[in-house]
Image (cartoon, rainbow, N blue to C red):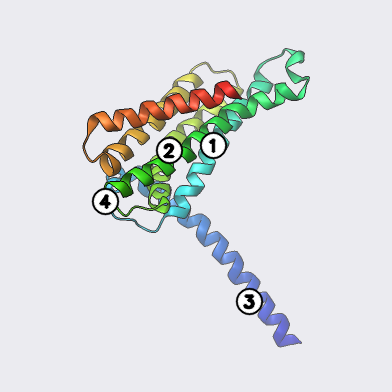
Amino acid sequence: MKNQNQNEVVEKQEDNKGKEGKLGNYFQYVMQVIKEPDHLLSDETQGKQQFGLITLIAFLGLILLSNVIGIFTYLDALRYLGFSDYFNYFERTIAYAVALALLLFVLKNVANKNGKTYDLNFFFEKLGALLVFPSILLLVSIPLELVDITIYSWFSSLAYTFLYLSIFLISYFFVAKNNLKTAVLFVAGFYFVYRLIFLIL
């Protein structure tokens, strides 16, 4: 019994260390992206698609949070009434999530047709890494908006600019292969799909 209990304690300690290690590795990954962004644009995968997916989800979560902040910054009580009013805060996040999902599938299929063997994990890794920058900008803008410092819009606008820049870079280097016109079409297509989904919602 004692040996069994000791083994359970050791296993729990190892699990906790593993979780802390993963968290520490993610912050190291973010710092590496900030310090050496050029390595993101290589054709090789670095086995960091999980970190890329985490960043992608975090980015969407920050979009949702920035919309929810509107509850605290506006004093009109009528905004709190009705399900549709609450759903409005999710519309932009859902629209971006669907548009990004469609974009990843389109990028993969077009790349495969052009003779590349990229899979979805490759694009998760590349797009997720590039979204580190807009995520940080949104993270800065949210508390500024919460305390009603007007320059929050500078950071949020720049964050969305970086999103479209990220799409352009991935399209240009990995799918369109230095074809400026095709890369611009990908960016424009993503924008119109996002706006269409947002309009439908």
Q: Secondary structure at mark 4?
A: loop
Query: Which callout, 3 or 2, points at the residue further toward the start of the chain?
Result: 3
Report whether residue 75 is seen: yes
**Amino acid type of the residue tagged 2 in the rendering:** Leu
Which of labels 3 and 1 is toward the front? Answer: 1
**Residue picked out by circle 1:** 60
Among numbered discs 4 and 2, the one appearing first in the sequence: 2
How many labels, in total?
A: 4
Residue placed under numbered mark 4 in the picture: 115
> What is the crowding at mark 1: few (fewer than 14 residues within 10 Å), some, or many (at least 20)?
some
**Picture quadrant of residue 46:** bottom left
**Residue lying farthest to the front in this orientation:** 113
Judge depth for marks 2 and 1 and give the one in front: 2
Disc on the earlier residue, 4 or 1: 1
* Image x and y of residue 145, in percent: 57, 22
Residue at coordinates 42% horizontally, 53% vertically from top-left? 121
Three-letter residue code for mark 4:
Gly
Residue 103 marker: 2
Where does label 3 land, which residue?
10
In terms of secondary structure, where does tag 3 sit? Answer: helix
Residue ID at (38%, 51%)? 122
- Amino acid at circle 1: Leu
C-alpha distance separating marks 3 and 2: 44 Å
Q: Amino acid at mark 3?
A: Val
Q: Earlier in the sequence, mark 3 or mark 4?
A: 3
